[in-house]
Image (spheres, rainbow, N blue to C red):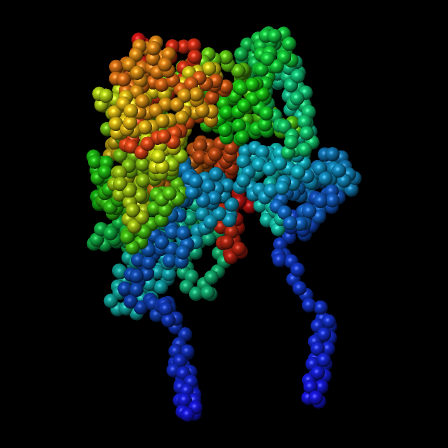
């Protein structure tokens, strides 16, 4: 009786190893694709390119979302936000000019992830030409152009934030690709940025055929916009004007009408992908941004600084029908200083958490105009710059109180006016710190006073003098390299200010 | 039996083997939980940089606790720093006495972990074990900014984490102050007039003596000394002139003498560096009930920069470069202008509570529409329930004749309403005042003037002290003449004949300091649950010897003096 059971059981047990035998020798991962299996079809190339954009909105590996980094890096050190009780210690330390290399806000991981996605496309997409007969050289060039442009934009962010960064332009797809790269100078990185942009411009698409792609993916205009920004940073003003003119003469963009403040706000910021937009990160209900938690819950991390309404936009106390459409109900909610741009569904109603998908606007037409104004002013065409400011101000119905009348020949005066107008136009769009730094460092830090005056107002009174003295050190204007990167890459050298 | 014997033998033998084997090699147990070095261990492990300070620590006898559990911050001077120091004092390392070594170590040591991120412009939050505060600042030299400690040594490497605290490496030995405030003032010819005033009033000695050896019990002072130039700018060219101006009793040592009060008004009884001074808006001085107001105007530290009834009084600047001087008894600042307690006559404050900066920023609302302010969004008004709002209201009703047509709607009472609301008043000059509340009476249910219906009694208090009378938002003023009304503690604060427009006398207060104060209204248990019916319009603080019922306040914002 017992034998009757034991024998079949033993036989069954002997069969078991045989069954698993075949799988056992298969080294392919069960839950993913390997490089050898991947780069086979043009659809896969397309997927990889779309993946680049996805990585800009949310990190697939759990790093801080890049869009959030763009906000933190662009606003935290400037003067338009203020902290709340829920602001983290690390965020507060950045505001107080007390940044240590252990501060995770200085972690660039998400940006390099995106760069690696770009590198992967640039390295592997050409191989698909042999694998997929329907994949054309023309299509390949367009994809590579997108990858190069995004890579250029990422490096542009990095040099503006960290000054010197390791320049990695080869993909890391296996362990043998992991190498320690030392930092490159800002000029070297910017040279690579310009090279990528020039190559990308040649093949970039002007029209993908649908609006979301035209605004959410790199187009020729987006490349020109990045170029204009980089040229402006490099103080190459003629080239900047030329790049701006390319966008302007394409006749594909314009300023959204500001006659009705609410319609303007909804078109530009709530719905997004407007006629004014050139390149914006596409969040949607499947892919929410992190701004709801940053700006809206009881645990909100930031509020608008009181100077935003008091000094930057100002208020007409005598006539409530006169107001800057960019101010109350657009950039901020004046009653409680909420940063409204990303959490408002209209001038007055706010988004629910599930509706937190306001796009992150990288470049829009107003930016092109004001970049052109800035370059023209530096070239000595102050009047043209003033004319452009007027266009922007008229659209926004800016108040008389914020109007300035510098002489067209007063370069610093006009530059200050442009800087202030940019603060009004691009409030909380992640541009303020970079605008201040660009203006301050122009002509060998000719306008250091811009930064010193700014930091005197943003830090608590009992840290003011320290903060000013720290800001006199130019290395302080760039973030430290995160300590983790220093331990894993021994070739990196810390920014001397943070030693 | 034999079987058992063999088992016994085997077990005994094997036990012996086990014993033998175990004793043959000693098993090493890990007795420490971490190999991280403590502060002392760290400096000892880096003799290339810290051998001198290690010797000093050894000599001081503090090596033991610096290598034990705790949380410390130590500023560690390098060998070259110690060499410079020894050269200055003309000693060799071995010639330092134990006491000297102890003092050096104590002045470099704090019983707290303070990373450089916690440094402010001024003193560190924790006192050194020596008993003097360390001051930190940031200095830019040739484009490179570094942290300077006690104006003596730069931090060349900061935030070195050890097992029992933090190490900041400094390039100079830090030296404690040796002079008292008086000696500092005496040594500076710019203060030659001020120092005579100090001596004449007896405060030279007060500021010269360390009044307790125990740092925890020591009383510190902050002196805002006026330079001769500052006095000359006000026409005081000599001590004689200063004395002539203030010395009214003939005896400067008399605490009630004006010269004594003048000196006391320049002394804050605390250790206040500029960073501390700008962190709070008013400071008590040794002069009884006289406060100094302070503020930061861009980068300038200003004292008594105030607006009084719409008139701006320019403040006195404290010169940064010559202030924040540490002394054994406190800290010395330089004032660039002459100042003394101002004799101000008490002035009536007619305070419209519905006019505050936050509502003025909303032109579409201010004197135009209703608006609910969330908790925390008004700086000078706070209340108990964070979920409640403060409702600013505007009305054109012909029966609600409030000043400027606006008021605060403050339903007070039961569990969901405001239990209390606290206002920060405008600046009130010290003196004796009668306090009035002005509101429009109403009842959610029932009829005003008749018993029953809503009830909303309120207890007001001023700086935490209950006023002698309560008021009730449902109560209207009687219909009498002004004189009769005042005698009964009422007034007609609006020109309107509407009896609902009620001013009620709340009590007499003694305002002791010319400053902003706290006025709180608290609902009493009898407050009902009916509809909100409350129209808080104004508070009046009127000096007791002035007319209490005029002017009257019109809906269009005008005042009526009859």
Q: Kindly give the residue lying farthest to the right in the view shown.
A: B95
Using the image as rendered, state which of residue B150 and residue B106 is in the foreground. B106
Q: Quadrant of the C terminus of chain B?
A: top left
Residue B86 place in picture, x, y as percent: 73, 37
* Residue at (64% x, 21% y) in the render: B185
* Residue at (56% x, 43% y) in the render: B115
Residue A320 place in picture, x, y as percent: 26, 28
Q: Determine the image quadrant of residue A95.
A: top left
Relative to A123, does residue B330 appear above or below in the rendering? Answer: above
Q: Is residue A33 visible?
A: yes
Q: Kindly give the residue lying farthest to the front in the view shown.
A: B451
Q: Determine the image quadrant of residue B98.
A: top right
Residue A242 place in picture, x, y as percent: 30, 42
* Residue at (31% x, 43% y) in the render: A343
Relative to B6, does residue B492 appear above or below in the rendering? Answer: above
* Residue at (73% x, 77% y) in the render: B16
């Amino acid at each position: 009786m017992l034998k009757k059971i034991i024998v079949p059981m033993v036989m069954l047990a002997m069969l078991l190893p045989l069954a698993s035998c075949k799988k056992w020798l298969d080294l392919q991962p069960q839950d993913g694709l390997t490089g050898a299996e991947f780069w086979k079809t043009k659809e896969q190339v397309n997927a990889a390119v779309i993946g680049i954009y996805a990585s800009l909105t949310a990190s697939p590996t759990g790093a801080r979302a890049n869009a959030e980094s763009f906000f933190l890096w662009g606003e935290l050190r400037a003067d338009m936000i203020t902290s709340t009780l829920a602001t983290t210690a690390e965020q507060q330390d950045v505001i107080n000019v007390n940044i240590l290399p252990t501060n995770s806000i200085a972690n660039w991981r998400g940006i390099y992830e995106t760069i690696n996605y770009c590198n992967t496309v640039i390295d592997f997409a050409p191989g698909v030409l042999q694998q997929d007969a329907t994949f054309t050289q023309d299509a390949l060039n367009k994809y590579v152009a997108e990858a190069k442009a995004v890579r250029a934009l990422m490096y542009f962010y990095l040099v503006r934030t960290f000054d010197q960064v390791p320049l990695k332009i080869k993909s890391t797809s296996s362990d043998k690709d992991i190498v320690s790269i030392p930092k490159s100078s800002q000029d070297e990185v910017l040279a690579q940025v310009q090279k990528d942009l020039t190559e990308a411009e040649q093949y970039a698409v002007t029209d993908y055929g649908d609006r979301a792609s035209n605004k959410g993916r790199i187009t020729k205009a987006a490349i020109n916009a990045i170029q204009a920004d980089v040229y402006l940073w490099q103080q190459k003003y003629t080239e900047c004007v030329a790049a701006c003119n390319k966008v302007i003469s394409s006749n594909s963009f314009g300023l959204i009408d500001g006659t009705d403040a609410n319609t303007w706000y909804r078109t530009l910021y709530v719905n997004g992908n407007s006629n004014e937009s050139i390149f914006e990160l596409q969040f949607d209900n499947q892919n929410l941004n992190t701004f709801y938690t940053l700006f809206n819950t009881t645990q909100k991390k930031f509020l608008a600084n009181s100077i935003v309404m008091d000094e930057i936009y100002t208020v007409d106390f005598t006539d409530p029908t006169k107001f800057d459409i960019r101010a109350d109900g657009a950039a901020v909610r004046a009653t409680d200083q909420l940063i409204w741009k990303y959490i408002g569904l209209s001038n007055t109603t706010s988004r629910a958490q599930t509706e937190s998908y306001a796009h992150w606007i990288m470049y829009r037409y107003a930016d092109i105009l004001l970049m052109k104004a800035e370059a023209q002013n530096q070239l000595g065409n102050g009047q043209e710059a003033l004319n452009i400011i007027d266009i922007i101000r008229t659209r926004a119905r800016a108040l008389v109180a914020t109007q300035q009348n510098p002489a067209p020949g007063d370069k610093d005066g006009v530059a200050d006016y442009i800087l202030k107008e940019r603060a009004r136009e691009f409030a909380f769009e992640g541009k303020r710190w970079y605008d201040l730094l660009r203006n301050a460092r122009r002509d060998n830090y000719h306008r250091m006073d811009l930064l010193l005056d700014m930091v005197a107002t943003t830090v608590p009174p009992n840290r003011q003098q320290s903060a000013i003295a720290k800001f006199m050190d130019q290395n302080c204007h760039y973030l430290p390299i995160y300590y983790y990167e220093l331990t894993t890459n021994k070739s990196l050298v810390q920014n001397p200010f943070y030693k | 039996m034999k079987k058992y014997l063999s088992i016994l033998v085997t077990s005994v033998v094997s036990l012996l083997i086990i014993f033998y084997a175990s004793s043959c090699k000693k098993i090493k147990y890990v007795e420490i939980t971490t190999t991280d070095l403590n502060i002392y261990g760290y400096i000892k492990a880096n003799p290339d940089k810290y051998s001198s300070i290690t010797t000093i620590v050894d000599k001081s006898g503090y090596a033991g606790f610096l290598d034990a559990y705790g949380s410390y911050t130590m500023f560690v001077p390098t060998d070259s720093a110690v060499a410079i120091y020894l050269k200055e004092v003309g000693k060799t390392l071995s010639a330092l006495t134990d006491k000297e070594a102890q003092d050096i170590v104590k002045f470099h040591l704090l019983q707290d972990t303070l990373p450089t991120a916690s440094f402010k412009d001024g003193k560190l939050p924790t006192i050194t074990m020596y008993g003097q505060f360390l001051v930190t600042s940031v200095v830019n030299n040739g484009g490179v900014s570094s942290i300077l400690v006690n104006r003596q040594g730069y931090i060349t490497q900061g935030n070195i984490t050890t097992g029992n605290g933090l190490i900041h490496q400094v390039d100079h030995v830090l030296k404690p102050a040796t002079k008292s405030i008086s000696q500092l003032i005496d040594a500076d010819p710019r203060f030659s007039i001020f120092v005579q005033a100090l001596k004449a009033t007896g405060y030279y000695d007060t500021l010269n003596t360390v009044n307790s050896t125990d740092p925890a019990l020591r009383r510190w002072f902050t002196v805002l000394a006026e330079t001769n130039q500052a006095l000359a700018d006000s026409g005081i060219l000599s001590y004689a002139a200063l004395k002539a101006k203030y010395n009214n009793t003939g005896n400067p040592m008399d605490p009630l003498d004006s010269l004594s009060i003048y000196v006391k008004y320049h002394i804050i009884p605390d250790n206040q560096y500029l960073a501390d001074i700008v962190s709070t808006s008013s400071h008590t001085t040794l002069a009884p009930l006289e406060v100094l107001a302070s503020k930061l105007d861009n980068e300038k530290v200003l004292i008594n920069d105030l607006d009084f009834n719409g008139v701006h009084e320019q403040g006195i600047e404290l010169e940064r470069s010559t202030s924040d001087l540490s002394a054994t008894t406190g800290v010395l600042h330089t004032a660039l202008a002459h100042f003394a307690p101002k004799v101000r006559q008490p002035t009536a404050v007619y305070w419209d509570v519905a006019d505050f900066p936050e509502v003025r920023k909303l032109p579409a609302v201010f004197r135009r529409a209703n608006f609910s302010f969330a908790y925390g969004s008004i700086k000078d008004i706070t209340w108990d329930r964070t979920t409640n709002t403060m409702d600013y209201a505007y009305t054109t009703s012909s029966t609600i004749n409030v000043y400027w047509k606006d008021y605060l709607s403050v339903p007070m009472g039961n569990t969901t309403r405001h239990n209390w609301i606290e206002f920060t008043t405008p600046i009130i000059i010290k003196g004796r005042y009668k306090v009035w509340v002005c509101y429009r009476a109403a009842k959610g249910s029932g009829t005003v003037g008749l018993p029953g219906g809503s009830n909303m009694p309120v207890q007001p208090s001023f700086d935490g002290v209950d006023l002698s009378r309560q008021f009730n938002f449902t109560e209207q003023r009687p219909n009498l003449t002004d004189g009769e009304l005042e005698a009964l503690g009422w007034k007609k604060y609006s020109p309107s004949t509407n009896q609902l427009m009620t001013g009620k006398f709340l009590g007499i207060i003694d305002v002791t300091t010319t400053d902003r104060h706290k006025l709180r209204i608290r609902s009493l248990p009898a407050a009902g649950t009916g509809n909100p019916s409350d129209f808080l319009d104004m508070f009046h603080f009127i000096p007791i010897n002035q007319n209490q019922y005029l002017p009257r306040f019109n809906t269009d914002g005008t005042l009526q003096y009859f």
